[in-house]
Amino acid sequence: MAAKERLSSSMEDYLEAILHISAEKQAARAKDIAKRLKVNNSSVTSALRLLSEKGLVNYAPYDIITLTAQGKKRAEEIARRHETLKDFFVKILLIDETEAEKASCKMEHVISNKILDRLISFVEFVEICPRGGKEWLRGFRRHCEGDDISASCEDSISLCLEDLRKKAQAFKNSQQEAVLLKEMDAGQRGKILQIKGHGEINKRLSAMGVSSGSIVEVEGRALQEERIEIKVRGYHLSLRNEDAAKISVEPYN
Amino acid sequence: MAAKERLSSSMEDYLEAILHISAEKQAARAKDIAKRLKVNNSSVTSALRLLSEKGLVNYAPYDIITLTAQGKKRAEEIARRHETLKDFFVKILLIDETEAEKASCKMEHVISNKILDRLISFVEFVEICPRGGKEWLRGFRRHCEGDDISASCEDSISLCLEDLRKKAQAFKNSQQEAVLLKEMDAGQRGKILQIKGHGEINKRLSAMGVSSGSIVEVEGRALQEERIEIKVRGYHLSLRNEDAAKISVEPYN
DNA sequence: TTAAAAAGTTAGATACATCAAACTTTTTGC
DNA sequence: GCAAAAAGTTTGATGTATCTAACTTTTTAA
């Protein structure tokens, strides 16, 4: 396999655009890419030639455009960076959608894996830790809106100290009941306890840095409930129920 | 005054390098810049010519290199972005110095003012709100280190619920005593209550988005205690005691 | 004070990302 | 099925950032 060459920001943008267009339509046309990236048609041709040389897109003049397996992997990695950043901006910094989108588009090209990883952990921690969470972020919102910080903090403390105690208690009590990932509902979140067996999933997951302790979120089902769609460490995955049955989870909320 | 043209990342790097070298030595030499940015000598010459044309550096062949007033302002703005990012990485995401430095170097060129601003507010809020703070971040550290998230959260709650109540109480009680910024000690932090008068400082501060409610930190004194050095919204400022006496602050910690 | 070393500049080349304009291929609608 | 429209490509240009190698100026130190 070719070594993972560094791609320029521009080329990353092209890959990402192709990924998104492919997801929306049957095939990506050069014109769509040009439109999406706001560049000239001829720039797209040059970019495609280059990406094709690198083995990241399947391209021949006048032919349809698709990502190779390798290209798709790269594109998904970029999309993950994008989404992670946006998540952080929207959920934690309380930035509006549009601005968050714009910012992630630029930052996705320069963020390191380490920072990305930490950002993911941080968003998890804020959302899950009873001492963080919605009420605390409400305090932050007030602070951003120019409200007195004492008041903002007070809001997130005095009002919630009792609530906090309850949440902490509930959090503590919830610990024993393990369920299978397969059995979880859309929207539910939990902590992976164990991944049984040593099959393909095990390998795939650990390659992504997923192991027991990782936080997993169920996004939905697909193919007549045959598959479960999850998000873990910023990756969107689709697992067969059969495989999801091998993963035990301790659910939250 | 020339319109504030967009600078490329590269040119921003040159400005920032000149700022830092000037702070360390008497004058910036082309060689130092080249070394710092790990580029060829001749690249520095081209960059200087360009920055000189834009009125950001004082430069003539073989002459010494300094920043113009405008150039200094731009450079300091870049340094502020850098520092704000680094602060967030180190203080909140608990990234090590070296990695944080490397990451900020890249991200400083692409972060928007809005995000920067929010990041500053967020770091303030985490550090000041009793519901956030050191214990909470200790919980986050445990989560990063792969400790069970329940345990990490519990650590930051059960252990601290009583502590939290005390902190909240202390925070509440601390509210009445206003002091003058002039009288605060190095390391102390507080919230600006009022900026008296309508002089130069008032204008300068409001141009930076500083007003009552902003969080200010005393960094130290300079010129035989004649001046006070503060940090507010990521800006490092040096005020005459006379001016600092016009600012009333509600101190924390 | 002057010649060698160090610092700085110029010239010319490469690589990248983009464009407009001219051209070619494919698609569409009658 | 064929002509016009749409899509895609090629060519040649621009601007940025970098390099190496050759050259010039300044500094240093004997």
Image (cartoon, coloured by chain):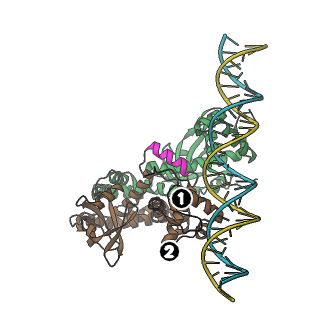
Chain colours: A green, B brown, C cyan, D yellow
Numbered mark located on residue B10 in the image: none
Q: Is the magenta stretch mostly helix, strand or loop?
A: helix
Looking at the picture, how far across and down is residue D30, in whole percent?
Answer: 69, 89
Q: Which of B69 and A77 is in front in this view?
A: B69
Q: Is residue A107 magenta?
A: yes
Alpha carbon of mark 2 to alpha carbon of mark 1: how far? Answer: 19 Å
Q: Residue furthest left?
A: B176
Residue A235 is at least partly visible in this image: no
Q: Which chain carries label 1?
A: B
Residue A23: quarter of image = top right
Name the residue carrying label 1. B52
Same chain, labels 2 and 1 = yes
Residue A62: quarter of image = top right
The residue under the point 41% across, 54% down is B117
Residue A4: quarter of image = bottom right
Amino acid type at mark 2: Gln
Q: Is residue B64 magenta?
A: no
Name the residue carrying label 2. B26
Q: Nearer the viewer, residue B210 or A29?
A: B210
State the SS at label 2.
loop
Amino acid type at mark 1: Ser
Single out the mark in the foreground, 2 or 1.
Answer: 1
Range shown magenta: A93-110
How busy is the neighbourhood of tag 2: few (under 14 within 10 Å), some, or many (20 plus)? few
Looking at the picture, how far across and down is residue A46, in whole percent?
Answer: 70, 41
The residue under the point 75% across, 35% down is A61
State the SS at label 1.
helix
Looking at the picture, how far across and down is residue B83, in whole percent?
Answer: 46, 63
Q: Nearer the viewer, residue A193 or B59?
A: B59
